[in-house]
Amino acid sequence: MNRGLDDARLNGEGEAERANIREYATPRRLTLVVTAIAERAPDVRRTLQGPPAKAAFHDGKPTKAAEGFAKKAGVAVSDLRVEGDRVVVEQQIRGQTAEEALPGILERIIRGVPSKKSMRWDALEGDDFARPIHWIVALLDGKPLSVQFADVKSGTTTRGHRFHSPRELQAPPARRYVEALREAHVVADWAERKKRIDEEVRRAAKEANGEPIPDDDLLETVTGLVEEPYGVRGSFDQSFLELPPEVLVSEMRGHQKYFAIRDPETKRILPAFVAVSNTKVRDPAVSRRGYERVLRARLSDGKFFFDEDRKTPLAARNERLARTVFVQGLGTQMERVARIGELARWLHGATGKGDARTLSRAAEVLKSDLATGMVGEFPELQGVMGRVYALHEGLPGEIADAIFEHYLPRGAEELLPKGDTGALLGIADRIDQLAGIFSIGKAPTGTSDAYGLRRAAIGLLRIVFARKYRFDLREALGEAQRILGVQASDKVWAFVQDRLAVHLRESAAPDSIQAVLGTKTADVVALADRLSALTQVRLKNRADFENTAATFKRIANILAQAQEKKLPPMAFDPSLLRKDEPSEAALAEALSRSQDQVGTALEDENYLSAYGVLAELRPAVDGFFDEVMVMHQDPKVRDNRLALLRSLHELFSPLADFSRLQVERTAA
């Protein structure tokens, strides 16, 4: 499957500030149609700074440094002038025309197309692409632009369908691009092609009196594999329906990219499928037999593995897991299973959820299906086959479900564990993965995440939120590190916090999220509740909240400065209150009255009530700052006032770290 940059047409039909860009893609072409771009860039005048004046001129005469700078700037030496202690020059840069600028821009676009793997097909260094490029077309107002990538130079002809329209054709005008390609048997528009595939699959499924099993991912994949789709219905022997439905669907979609068909009423899989062909053949029966022959071989293999796997109990397969390395430096799969079981029992104690004995029994066979022939052939069926085999050998349904559910969620799918056993084991699995990979120095860097740690952390958080488990996640990570026998590190918790911030960003402002994450709690459900309260209070009366938050942010800054000055924290002493400054005593009294209220509100997790007390305290705090000098010249008075502010800060710090909020005091 070759992919080329087919047409990058840029039509200067005006001087709109922003270009209108349409994108098209098929297996053989990547296309940009750009309209309404400027005919040329504006001229630019800028000041270039050169060498120091004393180095550029000696006794009023220019040196080699001045001459070199002038040459580089493209001006005469006489155009140089001294500004301050350096030589500068005004440079007039003529704006390029679209015809001059676009070739370089287009070449950079081609080189910037990302791919996981790329190849080189000529002797030139540096020019590689996902697949060899066969042709390039670049036109501006119908006129060719000179673009080159590797050994391919741009021309004015494109190509249609590989078989139905194999000859080169003159590149059409931009406004007729989609229509002209359609005439050449290429559906260039991705959305149009995807819709046609969906229609073809549904049409072919009706021939078998069925409907396609919904599969958006497969539909998206197939859209990228064909240029003119045709649905072909095929069938397979009824005996293969003895295989679990998951196996049938996996066999069809994973290797062959076939769409499985089900009965519209019973939703049971039918012995039929739909393949999407890129070529309309004269005799569909010939094509159908080819598709059926390939699938028959795959299903025969699957049935063999299924029959053989059921001869050996899951627990008996653990010997093989004991000889299989999980990750170098983290022991075998069997050692990992033992760690997951121990951590799951710890989570049971921390959350009060699940049953310790059931967790232990489920952990014993949690990964056993990794040693089966079916999962060896189809890794995506791990957990799925474990549940099937567990039920076959008569294990309790809760254990069988846990084997499947501990893998949930898989990617971005919505399906989550329904039982505590699967949920706790799934959390333990991901925590062990995070702690283990970090301990061997393989944490994600940039866009690289070879061990899927970001996905693991997000999956872990989704389970915790969905089931509202209350436990200290930081302690759980520490427990996992203890079980691993490695030194505890806060890096893992910081990584999970980053993923938590991503998870929460749709429900709150970024600074609100950071303020809540700045509290000492690692109970993520409590963190989400505090964020909800903070957001509600902030939105209800923004001006009042901004002023209150600004006041407490000031307190945090004062305490931070005191710490920087290494002023030792002291206990508050009421006897040191000055009678000539009543606002100090007023704040102390208001704080004393509010402590029980805030303590009760926090204990009951009624964060809105705690914010209400905070708002009531603000007048006393404002009066204190208006009339009292915190950093008094008397060290005892100063330290006592710092202690008063510290008590106030510590009382409300469980709500949020106000120093992280982007707020300013506003006029009342």
Image (spheres, rainbow, N blue to C red):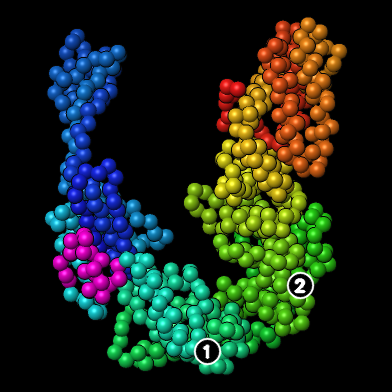
Q: Estimate how packed mark 1 is, as few (under 14), some (14 to 19) or many (20 or more) residues with alpha carbons within 10 Å.
A: some
Counting labels gives: 2
The residue furthest right is: 575
The residue singled out by tag 2 in the image is 398
The residue lying at 79 percent from left, 24 percent from top is 591
Please state the extent of the stretch shown in magenta in the rendering: 168-188
Q: CA distance from mark 1 to mark 2?
A: 31 Å
Q: Amino acid at mark 1?
A: Pro
Q: Please state the horizontal and vertical placement of residue 108, each as a whole percent of the image.
A: 28, 50
Residue under the image location 75 percent in, 64 percent down = 420
Residue 462 can be seen, yes or no: yes
Q: Position of residue 550 (x, y in %)?
A: 62, 26
Question: In the picture shown, does residue 531 fall above or below 309?
Answer: above
Mark 1 or 2: in front is: 1
Q: From the viewer's side, name the closer residue of 547 and 509.
A: 547
Check residue 182 for magenta coloring: yes
Quickly name the residue at label 1: 271
Left or right position of 327 against 148: right
Q: Which amino acid, mark 2? A: Glu
- Residue 117 is one of the magenta-drawn residues: no
Residue 517 appears in the rendering:
no
Q: Residue at x 42, y 79 (%)?
A: 201
Q: Is residue 490 above or below residue 45?
A: below
* Location of residue 586 (image quadrant): top right
Q: Quadrant of residue 93?
A: top left
Coordinates of residue 64 in the picture (x, y in percent): 19, 21
Quarter of the picture containing the N terminus is bottom left
